[in-house]
Image (spheres, helix red, strand yellow):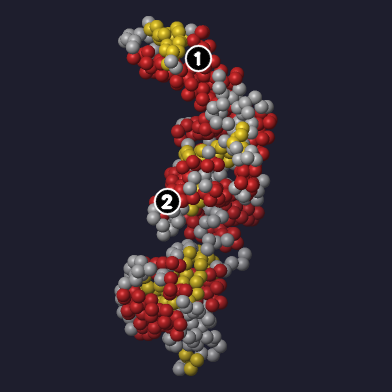
Amino acid sequence: MTLPASRWLTDLERLLPIRSQFVVSGAIHDSFLAPLPGGAALVPLIRALWETLKAKNYRFLLVYDPSDGLRVYPDEIAVREQAEKLFDLKLKSGSQIVSLETLANVMKTLVSMRETRCALVMDFASRITRQADHLAEGEHRFFIAAEKLATNAAPIIPLKDGVPAQGEKPLYNPVLWLVNRAQDLPSWFTLDSERIASLIIGKPDYEMRQAAAQQLAPLFAGYADAAEPAREKFVKRFAESTEGMSLTALSDITELADRSGLGMGDIDDAVRCYKVGALDNPWRKDYLREKIRDAQAFIEDRVKGQHPAVVKTLDILKRSVMGMTGAQARSGGSRPRGVLFFAGPTGVGKTELAKTLTQLVFGDEKAYLRFDMSEFAEEHSGARLLGAPPGYVGFDAGGELTNAVREKPFSVVLFDEIEKAHPRILDKFLQILEDGRLTDGRGDTAYFSETILVFTSNLGIFVEDKLGNRVQHVKPGDAYETVEKNVREEIGNYFKYKLSRPELLNRIGDNIVVFNFIRPEIASLIFDSMLNNVARRLAEEFKLKLALTPQVHEQLLKRCTGDLSNGGRGIGNQLESAFINPLSRAMFEHDLEGKTRLAVSGMSEQDKVVTLALQSS
């Protein structure tokens, strides 16, 4: 295949006749494909730059960095001696420490050099000054000298035997500043001079990654013996799965695969291992499939009365485990494993289902990452969640979300009450849902490709009428079909019209899971389950067996399930107020030493104080 050219190098060639200095920023520490005598290879920036300039008859590069000073490239004896003679340098040890004043003189000599073509590369130029906007006196003089040279320099034709060489076109002897960000240099230096060009090195596109994958492919086990169609398929998959990555990352993935014994067929595992730092993939474990196959009874034991929601959630989970998320797209491998949008009334089991999923997949319900989105209602709070932008206070700390996902790449991430977050923060979820990654202020990328994202919301239960009053849109007793239809409709209206972000709703897709109201018969089951939890706590803490008379049980059931507007959480609150509190009070008054049974034989209320009649034995 034809070797694609890096855009910044193409732009450099095009601008050499008209620009004297270049500020090169972006991915300056990446690797680059360059044509070498032995064939194409991935090389560092300096080597790629040299191969480009050598083709234009440049003789050598002078490379300066604040740590080692000046050196010559390529490091050959004849070239070094020529540079020493032309610039009055002493490079016998390979490099020479020079002051900024001496460097300015070298720069002045270089731009007017007629004896040979050469270039000066200011490597690690971001570290020449401590603060680009607060220069020391010597630093200020140095950049003024550089700006003056950029303005006064002229393109030259090298001399041969004292006369301009035939067939040569006038080109500058350029100065190239390699910086992480353009703002690492004084702003006036680049803004006030038309002779200084800015070149930005971006992440490699698909064509470049494909060419790099072609060069790296022979290093994978099994490639040499594979048929040509299998090789082509492998190269294509390698390029597709590394979207947004550098060529250096492709090299590292290849090295990682070699050390881990991964072959052509394991390219997805190699890329995932590079992204999340773990070779072991819990999503592919056979035991997980067994657990999920029989999971419905386990989930419905904890989340009662939500059969349609449980079934749909399990469908999405099974799709995630089988790696079929986004299978309809050309490339969906980098998207999150699964996305769930739990909607419905308060206290019906949305958060509980997220915990149950975590318990099911990871064996511990506390293994999920939870973010209460009501804490991110202000736009500036996004810096806390996702990391402050570069240059702002705290940008080097990263974000709570990105840090947590890097620490636990295989996890369930719960975003509670998503509608309470600021709309600008919600915009960040577009990138997570589509590309499965997010970069924080430090420049570190968190990959969400191995996570399940769960959003919870109360949207659609209450709406505003024409007078702006908050009215209930769906009510207990409505058929589930009605609840689901109305809630889905209001969620759509919220994202499309109130937020004006239909694209976010489109990314969530049909993964909206609507929960029903707690029905009276289900409330009774929830009540009994909570009462059993109380009995279990008594047995664990005091070795006591709890017993209630049928009359007390019925009385307590009516009290706790009389109002279901707050769902299961409301049942729990009533049980705590009407039973657990008076039970704790009564236990203080009883001598429980040596007792094994605690019976509640009566329940009364006076002045809104509930009293229980206890008998211990």
State the quadrant of the N terminus. bottom right
Say if 560 sits above or below 490 in the image.
above
Q: Residue furthest bottom?
A: 162
Say if 403 sits above or below 167 in the image.
above
Q: Which mark is residue 398?
A: 2
Q: Residue at 52% of width from left, 44% of height from top?
A: 421
Residue holding disc 1: 556
Q: List x then y, in percent, for residue 158.
A: 48, 87
Mark 1 nearby-residue class (10 Å; few <14, some 14–19, many ≥20): some
Q: Are marks 2 and 1 in contact (CB under 8 Å)?
A: no
Q: CA distance from mark 2 to mark 1?
A: 50 Å
Q: Which element type, helix, strand or loop, lies under badge 2?
A: loop
Q: Is residue 522 left or right of residue 60?
A: right
- Asked where in the image residue 89 lies, by quadrant, the reply is bottom left
Badge nearest the viewer, 2 or 1 = 1
State the quadrant of the C terminus. top left
Say if 250 sits above or below 565 in the image.
below
Q: Is residue 31 left or right of residue 90?
A: right
Q: List x then y, in percent, for residue 272.
A: 51, 47
- Asked whether residue 173 is in view, the answer is no
Q: Residue at 53% of width from left, 53% of height from top?
A: 220
Front-lying residue, 487 or 150: 487
- What's under tag 1, amino acid-wise? Leu
- What's under tag 2, amino acid-wise? Gly
Q: Which element type, helix, strand or loop, lies under badge 1?
A: helix
Q: List x then y, in percent, for residue 607.
A: 43, 15
Front-lying residue, 319 or 3: 319
Q: Residue at 49% of width from left, 45% of height from top?
A: 377
